């Protein structure tokens, strides 16, 4: 009962209420939405972070204890978390905390992001090998789009930017919209199945 | 003070439609030439002096959002030119009120009723005749056994990444369904699944799902709760963490299932570099090309949502897939008919008959913007 029926009943009531709420602009409806989404969800997420932190510490402490490969990364992760946490709690006005964020975390994130350029190059190299008709078509289209997006494309042939624009806004857009319509319908159907209790795998098993 | 009440320059005030109240829509017509700014004034019923209520933008329309529901107001506008000003005012009191139905969303409601109806009908039909439903092969889902088996033979773990969205995302829910199937196979083969998480709620759900999957496979003892762990809520921190796991643990199979952003290719390329068999699936259309380029198998968009039906072969779930397909066919027909009628309407308009274009625009306005 508590494991299946109650969560299913909650999913049905809240799911159906949220569906109706979408069509009602009245302040009562807005308040309901704010309570569910902006208050309950934040409260639940806040409590879930306790579990998250427990999981984080347990995972890394076990790795350190067993001296698994790269265990000192785990030690670094714990030290970094505690250092960041204490800098936010102890220092006044958050200057030190902001500096840590702006001059350590942000550059580290930018470094990870910049790796994407190299990964795109290596993935493109594999994807563009002309093994069959489809791959050749992909290669030719990609070369046209790449040349048309840089100034040399316009220099080589005046019509190149227009051709690229057509590729992007007609065949490319048609394929993207097809996938998006499918995703949208699939998402609506999934939501319906959850509300009606047909789809139950999210509760841990069929 | 000299001002002109000129013929033509006028103001209309109405309760703003389809809103939560507290707003009156002000529209001015025939704004005098050379107007530099239009000032708005408001008089509440019972008051004697007009109060300033801001400026109206040059397009001549604005919402007065500082009104109180139920209180009646008169409005006056003053269009100021370089050397004089012109005044227009409303004749009747107007008040704002909240609405109980947003009419701009009527097309969404109609679509939902039709779509929901079709899906429910097919679910019922599927229950009556479960053998009459066919679902085409999805190689990415068929490859799960192969990937887990290969990983087990190599003595390596399986890595499952559920994306960067919360449990409210449909893609994440679909990934949980696939996780259940992966978990069962992992338990049956006596392997191990590593599940790093971006969202704590997804982490708890994944723990429960895997626990149940291991129990159903008859191996509850083999489930290690700490293999489903929390990593970080930072996008590239998460990417770096998962990359680190890939390079240290060298999983034999990697499942990238859920909603991904720019980190998709970073993860998929790292997985490729360690020689793992990769099965991706996402409802993020912008990330699909990256997965197609770097992974062995990909579930494209809606295929993810069909996973639960495909895996379980449960008639009611298969029926919902059939219903979605029928709705897609209807939308396809509607788009086709719209293209043909729109082209015809433009040709007729160029030939001097604008009535068809008018009908087309009204239909388009109703469907796209809900302004029937």
Image (cartoon, rainbow, N blue to C red):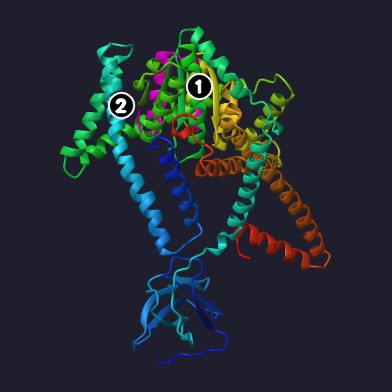
Question: Could you tell me residue A29's position as x and y percent?
Answer: 42, 60
- Residue at 44%, 74% in the rendered image: B96
- Residue B287 visible, this orientation: yes
Question: Does the stretch in magenta take in B82?
Answer: no
What kind of element bears circle 1?
Answer: helix
Q: Give the quarter of the figure containing the N terminus of chain B.
A: bottom left
Which residue is tagged 2? A55
Span highlighted in magenta in the image: B230-258
Image vertical order of residue A77 relative to residue B56, above or below: above
Instruction: Examine the rendered structure and indicate whether residue A56 appears above or below residue A145.
Output: above
The residue drawn where x is 47% and y is 24% is: B267
Q: Is residue A61 left or right of residue B360?
A: left
Say few, some or many: other residues with alpha carbon within 10 Å of mark 1 (under 14 / 14 to 19 / 20 or more): many
Count the marks.
2
Which chain does tag 1 point to?
Answer: B
Q: Nearer the viewer, residue B288 or A11?
A: A11
Relative image position of residue B208 (x, y in whole percent): 40, 28
Q: Mark 1 touching mark 2, by CB under 8 A?
A: no
The quadrant in which residue A156 appears is: top right
Tell me what residue is drawn at x 35 percent, y 87 percent: B46
| Crowd around label 2: few <14 · some 14–19 · many ≥20 (10 Å) | many
B44 lies left or right of B363: left
Coordinates of residue B135 in the picture (x, y in percent): 67, 30
Residue B2 to residue A184: above or below: below
Same subunit: marks 1 and 2:
no
The answer for which chain carries disc 2 is: A
The residue that label 1 is drawn on is B182
Secondary element type, mark 2: helix
- Residue B68: x and y, percent? 37, 74
């Amino acid at each position: 009962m508590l494991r299946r029926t109650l969560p299913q009943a909650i999913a049905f009531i809240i799911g159906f209420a949220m569906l109706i709420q979408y069509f009602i602009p009245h302040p009562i409806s807005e308040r309901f939405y704010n309570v569910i989404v902006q208050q309950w969800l934040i409260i639940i997420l806040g409590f879930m972070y306790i579990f998250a932190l427990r999981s984080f510490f347990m995972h890394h402490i076990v790795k350190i204890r067993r001296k698994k490969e790269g265990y000192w990364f785990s030690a670094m992760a714990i030290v970094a978390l505690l250092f960041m946490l204490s800098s936010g709690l102890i220092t006044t006005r958050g200057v030190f905390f902001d500096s840590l964020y702006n001059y350590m975390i942000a550059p580290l994130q930018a470094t990870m992001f910049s790796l994407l350029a190299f990964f795109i190059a290596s993935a493109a190299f594999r994807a563009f090998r002309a093994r069959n008709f489809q791959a050749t078509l992909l290669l030719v289209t990609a070369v046209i789009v790449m040349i048309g997006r840089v100034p040399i494309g316009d220099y080589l042939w005046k019509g190149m930017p227009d051709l690229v624009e057509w590729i992007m806004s007609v065949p490319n857009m048609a394929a993207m919209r097809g996938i998006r319509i499918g995703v949208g319908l699939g998402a609506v159907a999934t939501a319906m199945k959850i509300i009606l209790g047909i789809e139950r795998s999210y509760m841990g098993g069929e | 003070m000299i001002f002109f009440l000129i013929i033509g320059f006028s103001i209309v005030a109405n309760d703003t439609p389809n809103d939560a109240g507290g707003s009156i829509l002000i529209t001015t017509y025939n704004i005098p030439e050379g107007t530099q700014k239009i000032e708005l004034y408001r008089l509440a019923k019972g008051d004697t002096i007009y109060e300033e209520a801001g400026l109206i933008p040059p397009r001549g329309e604005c919402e007065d959002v500082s009104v109180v529901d139920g209180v009646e107001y008169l409005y006056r506008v003053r269009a100021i030119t370089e050397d004089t000003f012109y005044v227009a005012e409303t004749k009747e009191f107007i008040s704002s009120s909240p609405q109980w139905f947003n009419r701009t969303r009527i097309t969404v409601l109609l679509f939902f009723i039709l779509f929901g109806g079709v899906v429910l009908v097919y679910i019922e039909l599927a229950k009556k005749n479960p053998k009459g439903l066919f679902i085409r092969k999805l190689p990415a889902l068929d490859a799960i056994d192969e990937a887990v088996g290969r990983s087990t033979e190599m003595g390596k773990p399986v890595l499952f990444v559920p994306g960067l969205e919360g449990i409210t995302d449909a893609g994440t829910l679909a990934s949980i369904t696939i996780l259940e199937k992966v978990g069962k196979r992992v338990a049956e083969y006596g392997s191990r699944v590593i599940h790093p998480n971006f969202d704590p709620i997804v982490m708890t759900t994944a723990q429960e799902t895997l626990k149940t999957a291991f129990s159903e496979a008859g191996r509850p003892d083999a489930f290690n709760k700490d293999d489903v762990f929390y990593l970080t809520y930072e996008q590239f921190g998460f990417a770096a963490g998962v990359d680190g796991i890939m390079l240290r643990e060298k999983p034999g199979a990697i499942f990238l299932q859920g909603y991904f952003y720019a980190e998709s290719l970073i993860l998929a390329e790292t997985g490729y570099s360690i020689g793992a068999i990769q099965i991706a699936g996402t409802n993020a259309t912008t990330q699909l090309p990256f997965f197609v380029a770097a992974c062995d198998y990909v579930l494209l968009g809606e295929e993810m949502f069909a996973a639960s039906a495909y895996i379980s072969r449960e008639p009611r779930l298969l029926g919902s897939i059939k219903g979605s397909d029928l709705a897609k066919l209807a939308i396809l027909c509607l788009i086709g008919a719209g293209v043909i009628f729109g082209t015809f309407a433009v040709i007729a308009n160029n030939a001097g008959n604008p009535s068809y274009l008018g009908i087309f625009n009204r239909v388009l306005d109703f469907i796209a913007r809900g302004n029937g």
